[in-house]
Amino acid sequence: MKYLLALLLLVFSNDLFCQKEYDDEVFAQALIYQQTYEFSKAIETYTELLAKDTVYEAYYNRGMCYLVLQKNALALNDLLIALPQFDDDFFLNHMIAGAYMLLDDYKNATLFFDRALKYGLVPDAFEASHIGTCYYFDNQPDSAMKYLEMAFEEDVLNTRALTNMGWVYLENGSYEKAKTMFEKCLSIEKDNPSYLNNLGFAYFKLGDIDKGKELILKSKELDDQNSFVYRNLALIYKEQGKRKKACKNYQIALSLNIVQKWGEKYVKELIGYCE
C-alpha cells in the first residue's frame, strides 16, 4: 500500500528510531537488525528482550517493525503500550494513526492524526490526502476537505486527493464539482478506468444517464474486475426500472467484494432494491 510506503520512508531515517543508552546487548542487536531493515529478526530480538523486562523503547521499535510488515493489529498493541512513555512523540502518534487507518478504524485514526499534528507533524501532500480520507470515512466532510485541499495545493498532480475530494462532493450533492475533480484526474491519467468510472457516476448523478453509462461501460472494458463499475451500472439500471439487470450487476459487485465504506448509502440503496 502507498501509505505503508510512506511509513517505510520515515522508518528508514535512523533519527526516528526510539534509541536509548541501554546496556543490554540484546537491545543493541535488535536495533542493528532494525536499522538494516531486517525487521523479522528485529522483532524476534525485541521479543527476547521483552520476555525478560519491560522496556518501552522495545515496544515502540517492535511496533514500528510490525507496521512495516503489515501486521497492523500487533503493531497497534505495541505502540499503544509505548504511548504513555512517549505521549508527545509526534512520530509515535503518527504510526498509531496509520495502524488504526489500516485497520479501518477511522475515528481513532483521526484522533491520533490530530495528536501527531499537535505535537509537530507537518504533513506533506501524501500524508494530508490520507488524513483527509480518514475524516471522510469518519463522516467529517469539512475536515476531510480541509486536508484534501491542502494535499492538492501542495501537489496538483495528487490524484488521490482529487478523487477523494470528488467523493466528498458526491456525498454532499455537489455533483458538478465532483465531475470537475474526476475530469482533472483523467487529464493527469488519461483512460484510467477508475477515473472513467467515477466521472461516469458523476454524470449519472447530474442526470445525464446516457453519458454516465457510456463512461462506466468504457471503464468496464479496461477493467472488468472493478466492483464499483457493477455497483454503478446497477444504480443506473435501477433508475431506468430494469430490475433484473440492476440486481444482476449488484450481485457481480458483491462477488468482487465491493468495499462498502465507499459510498455506503448507494450499496444500502441496492440492498433494499434487490434483497
Image (cartoon, rainbow, N blue to C red):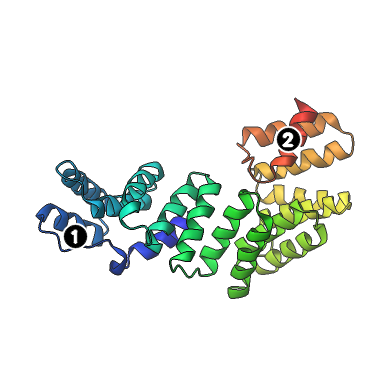
Relative to 23, say whether 157 is above or below.
below
Q: Is residue 9 left or right of residue 191?
A: left
Looking at the rendered structure, the kind of residue marked 1 is Ile
* Residues packed near mark 1 inside 10 Å, few (<14), some (14 to 19) or many (20 plus): some
Q: Which of marks 1 and 2 is nearer the N terminus?
A: 1
Q: Is residue 249 visible?
A: no
Q: Can residue 108 be seen in this view?
A: yes
Q: What residue is at 55 percent from the left and 59 percent from the top?
A: 131
Q: Nearer the viewer, residue 203 or 213?
A: 203
Looking at the rendered structure, the kind of residue marked 2 is Lys
Q: In this view, does 202 lie to the left or right of 123?
A: right
Q: Can you give x and y, in whole percent of width and height, for residue 191 in the image?
A: 69, 60
Q: Is residue 77 left or right of residue 205?
A: left
Q: Can you give x and y, in whole percent of width and height, for residue 214 in the image?
A: 81, 51
Relative to 47, say whether 126 is above or below.
below
Q: What residue is at 38 percent from the left and 65 percent from the top?
A: 10
Q: Nearer the viewer, residue 112 or 269?
A: 112
Secondary structure under the numbered disc 1 in the rendered image: helix
Q: In this view, does 101 lie to the left or right of 253?
A: left
* Residues packed near mark 2 inside 10 Å, few (<14), some (14 to 19) or many (20 plus): few
Q: Mark 2 points at which residue?
A: 268
Distance from the alpha carbon under mark 1 to that under mark 2 = 51 Å
Q: Mark 1 points at which residue?
A: 32
Q: What residue is at 73 percent from the left and 41 percent from the top?
A: 265
Q: Can you give x and y, in whole percent of width and height, for residue 229 in the image?
A: 71, 45
